[in-house]
Amino acid sequence: MSQNQPHKLFLLDAMALIYRAHFAFSKNPRINSKGLNTGVMLGFTNTLMEVLTKEKPSHIAVAFDTSAPTFRHEQFEPYKANRQEQPEDITVSIPWVKEIVKAFRIPVLEMDGFEADDIIGTLAKKAERESFTVYMMTPDKDYGQIVDDHIYLYKPAFMGNGVDVMGPKEVCAKWDIEHVDQVRDILGLMGDAVDNIPGIPGIGAKTATKLLKEFGTVEELIKNTDKLKGKQKENVENFAQQGILSKELATIKIDVPIAFNEEDLRYDGFDEEKLRAIFNELEFRTLSNRIFKDEGKKAVIQKNEQLGLFGEAPSSSPASEIEFEEESVNTSAPVVPDTIHSNLHHYHKIKGKDAIEELMEYLMVQKVVCFDTETTALNAMEAELVGISFAYLSGEAYYIPCPADQKETQAILELLMPFFENEDILKVGQNIKYDLLVLKNYGIEVKGALYDTMLAHYLIEPEGKHSMDWLAEQYLNYKPVSITELIGKKGKNQGNMRDVDEDEVTSYAAEDADITLRLKEKFDPLLKENELENLFYKVENPLINVLTDMEFEGVKIDTDSLAELSQALEEESIAIEKRVYELAGVRFNLASPKQLGDVLFEKLKLDPKAKKTKTGQYATGEEILSKLADEHEIAQAILDYRQMVKLKSTYVDALPTMINSKTGRIHTTYNQFVAATGRLSSINPNLQNIPIRTERGREIRKAFVARDENHVLLAADYSQIELRIMAAFSGDESMIEAFKNGRDIHATTAAKIFQVPLEEVTSDMRRKAKTANFGIIYGISAFGLSQRLSIPRGEAKEIIDAYFKEFPAVKEYMDGAIEKARKDEYVETILGRRRYLRDINSRNQTMRGFAERNAINAPIQGSAADLIKVAMIDVHNWMKKEKLKSKMILQVHDELVFDAHKDEVEILKENIPGLMSNAIKLAVPVEVEVGLGKDWLEAH
DNA sequence: GCGAGAGG
DNA sequence: CCTCTCGC
């Protein structure tokens, strides 16, 4: 065999896997029509199939114990005597399992006088010498002693735990020992109740570890009892022999007289006829369909052939070389992703009270359960439930259809209520806020901690895609059933989940829950590695509940005043449009920047050096038109027209159409996954860009009103929060000083950079300083500042130089941030939220510059986001604790808006600023301003 | 997909 | 610097 071909040997401990399957099915036994309990056979076959498809061993064997006594019984009579009588189901199942293994054309290894451990231990060591990578598949911890550079302990997935592959490092870490050999010493000292290995009395896992750290082996310990004290000394001395014997019993033999013959263990595919016959006998119809179905067969068998694994596939196939150079099973991803057809799973449809109640019994004893709702709409506030899926074991999921009859659905939910309201079960979901909101509309308040896989990935890879399909492919090499297959492409003609065949929805929904759960397993270690656990568990996940409540509440708008405004804007914009055509001397589409550009710069020739956009059009942006406005009436008219059209189309006319017919209010959706800096964003509609700067814009703000006469709007906003964070991070004395004394920060900045007393700061100086302050936060350049202030680049540079001279710590901080980014390729916020800046070392000036500005801006903008997120959680919890009637309804980056009950205005005003200021401790005072009013403009 | 403009 | 929505 050439070195190019894979040497990947899997050795399975049949007995251990059989016991495992037995216990997995002991709660709900599977009895076939002949009264045979087939749970063990099914569980074992599934595990075997999973190994073959997922890990693609080149060689494989299954080892069994025999009933003959082994050398261990001869050494120590009570060995394994403790073990209860083997359950009858297992005794009956063993011959079946052997037949199944044989039908897979996998060798069955057994030898009188030796246990499966010894056979596996011996073969593992022999195979390693033949340059195999060996995986010992067993949940039995004793095998740790055999683990070596190329021998791994492969614990199959079980009860919610994913596959666990342990090399020497992991084994040593698990027991806190120096060398894997010491697994024997540990077991020798502490004993093993299951196998009735006695050990030394009074020594458990902890003491064993401690003693071995000092003495290394059982033998050395016994020689040095003089270094022990008291009862421990006595025990070790009195039971020395028993300790030595225990170690011997726990030692897996590696010199069993068994030959290692490579060719015998090579896996060549299964015997279809035989396997079919066995499955028929056992009545494994689903499994049979899956394996023998044309698609399934292709996936299982041909995939392997492609990889050059089986038969006479050429050994020089480049794909196979690349594919199998990998050492670790986790990285040897197959080329073709698994799908619902090729992957092993059990997806069940659960219907009827009895079945649901039975499922509930299982759910209620879990610690971690994933669920997912299927609905009729994308908008959670308008969606009806079509079904709910649950998963708590990888590869296993349940789907409960919910009928269109809402009474029946309500009755189903009644049965599920104890699960959703259980405080102790971790609820896992992909974009779980959606599901919470759907359920909330059915009157269900989901309680207990949440775990959103989308959110997990957002923290791990802030700028990545977080859709389930994408994550499944990336992390699980799995291609889920696509939603378009079920309900068609997005858009007008997209079907409704309600109309899809129930079995198809079952597969789809159950798969979603299953995948989500499996993603969690992948993300857990990544969150830990990147130190994101605190942010994830303490901030982002708890925030989901806050956002759910806010979205559920929504906000009231005054449609009458908007209708009036619409009318006024309509008339005025038509008048201005007319005026523009008069001035231009031609009619054209004013709403088309392309046509406008041609009219302004080709026909009217307003600017011979007119700038163009990257697509070759003339640029007609606000900045450009503003410059022309002094000389040309048309420019100002266009600006006015644009403003009116913008306000009308984006707000005045759009908002009333977004009112929910049931609640009469507007419910935005807060997106927790899109802003790379950690901010929230708001869509459908975006309530984070409601106008405020212009007179007309403020009219729109006035239309956001309190819920009724008993309420007012209360707005609380952080004052200069990003600048304060900059001051705190840089530690700049004079900036911190200004904040501590509550001075006008922009005026103070102006006084410093223009070298005048505070009283002599003009409004123009203040404006420039204010722009400079914002620019600093954005990691600005002299060019950027000159643009914003419409001043020459040289003057802008002078301002920046003066700024850095007056605030030297700010300059240092900025340089340090870029330095850190260059080293780590990421920057982070106060709570450790990361932003990766992989272009920071790019040779492309533009890309590098962009990354450098981000290195400065991201930690500041992101820390401000961290702060308000924590504040939202704190305020929300406080309001809940106080059982207030008032509701938090909006968040606009540095501002929170409340629908405040008039009776509670005082208590809110007293508590909210403090909760917001103290959410995270900063080295500068954090100020919060509170306003009240019947509408948002007045409150702000 | 882009330009423009609303917000922070 | 970060978004979202509109109309072309």
Image (cartoon, coloured by chain):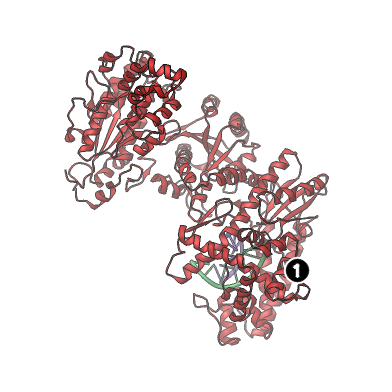
Chain colours: A red, B green, C purple
Of residues A390 and A11, the one nearer the viewer is A11
Horizontal side of A89 relative to C5 (left or right) equals left
Q: Chain of mark 1?
A: A
Horizontal side of A207 relative to A816 (left or right) equals left
Can residue A683 be seen from the camera position used here? Answer: no
Residue matched to label 1: A695
Of residues A912 and A612, the one nearer the viewer is A912
Q: Quadrant of residue A779?
A: bottom right
Of residues A694 and A74, the one nearer the viewer is A74
Q: Dot 1: what SS?
A: helix
Q: Residue A320: x and y, percent?
A: 25, 48
Mark 1: which amino acid? Glu
Q: Measured along the vertical axis of the image, is residue A572 above or below residue A251?
A: below
Q: Residue A60: x and y, percent?
A: 25, 34
How many numbered circles are shown?
1
Q: Measured along the vertical axis of the image, is residue A238 above or below residue A224?
A: above
Q: Residue A218: x and y, percent?
A: 35, 24
Q: Residue A260: x and y, percent?
A: 18, 32
